[in-house]
Image: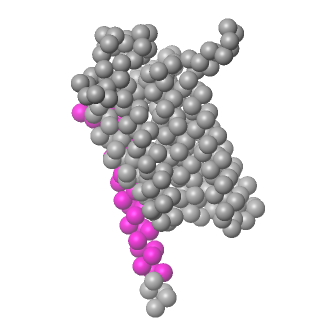
Amino acid sequence: MFQYIYINNDTVIASYNLFVGFGLIIGLLYLDYQINKMSILDSHITSIYLCVIFALVFGFLGAYFFDALTQGKLDTLEGVGLTFYGGLLSGLISIIIFIRIFRLDMMETLNLLTPSLVIGHAVGRIGCFFAGCCYGEPTNSPWGIVFPKGSFPTLQFEYGTALHPTQIYEAFFLFVLFVVILKVVSFRYRAIVYFISYGLIRFFIEYLRADDRGTILNQIALSPSQLISIMIVIVGVVLWGITQEQERNIQNSNI
C-alpha cells in the first residue's frame, strides 16, 4: 500500500489519482473499441463522446459535493474527497439529459457505456487500496490487510490491526462483473445487470466499511451509499420491466 509514488525528489504522484487516471483511460479505450465494432453513425459517435465528456465533468463535481454534503462540509469544503455514488448520480443525470439533447437511443447508449464504467471503476478501486481510503473493519481472517503507519486506517485503528480489504473486494467483484456483462449478459440488459448487481454488492460491502460514511437526511441506520444502493437497484428493476415489456411488444408485432 503506497499512498504516494515517488518518481524523484521533485516528482510525487498520488496513487489514487494515478489509478483513477488509468481507469479513465482504460474505460475510454474500451468504449472506442466497442464503437469500432458496432455500426454507429459518425454523427452519433461524436454525440456519444460529448455525452461522456459532460458526464465526466458533472460526475467529478457530483462526487466532490456529495462527499461535502454527507460529511457536513458544504460550508467550508475543507478536507473533501470524492464519493463514487455522488459521481454516478450526477454523471447519470447529466448523461441522460445530453442523450435526450442529442437524440440518441437511451438504453442503447447506456448499455454501450456500461462496460467502460465497470472496468474504469474497478481500476479506480485499486487506487483506493493503495491510497488506504475506503478501508474495512478489523478482521481475523487470513486475508486481512495491515496498512502502513501514517495511512488513513492507522488514524482510526492501532497500527498492526488487520482490516477487511473492502477496496479489493469491490474491485474483484467489478472485474468479474465486467467479464460477465461481456460474455454472458445480452447487450440489451447490460445497464440493468450493472444497476442491480452493483447496488446489491455495494449495499453489503458497506457493512464491512470502517471509514466515516457520513450521513444524509439525518439517517443513521443506513449509510448514504446504502440508501443510494437501494435506489439504483429499484431503477434497475424498473428498467428490466420496461425492457421486458418492449420485447413482448416486438414479439407481438411480429406475429
Residue 3 lies within the magenta run: no
Residue range corresponding to the magenta coloring: 221-250
Please state which of residues 149 and 64 is positioned toward the viewer in this rendering. 149
Residue visible at 52% across and 37% down in the picture: 123
Q: Using the image, determine if residue 189 lies above or below residue 155.
A: below
Residue visible at 42% across and 67% down in the picture: 242
Residue visible at 30% across and 20% down in the picture: 162
Please state which of residues 9 and 28 is positioned toward the viewer in this rendering. 9
137 vs 86, left or right, is left
| Number of numbered labels in the structure image | 0
Please state which of residues 136 and 79 is positioned toward the viewer in this rendering. 136
Q: Using the image, determine if residue 248 lies above or below residue 19.
A: below
Please state which of residues 72 and 193 is positioned toward the viewer in this rendering. 193
Residue 236 placement: quadrant: bottom left
- Magenta: main secondary structure equals helix
28 vs 225, left or right, is right
Residue 227 lies within the magenta run: yes
Q: How is the image coloured?
A: one colour
Q: Position of residue 177 (x, y in %)?
A: 44, 50
Question: Outermost residue, bottom direction?
Answer: 255
21 vs 127, left or right, is right
Residue visible at 31% across and 26% down in the picture: 144
Q: Position of residue 212 (x, y in %)?
A: 35, 23
Q: Position of residue 128 (x, y in %)?
A: 47, 28
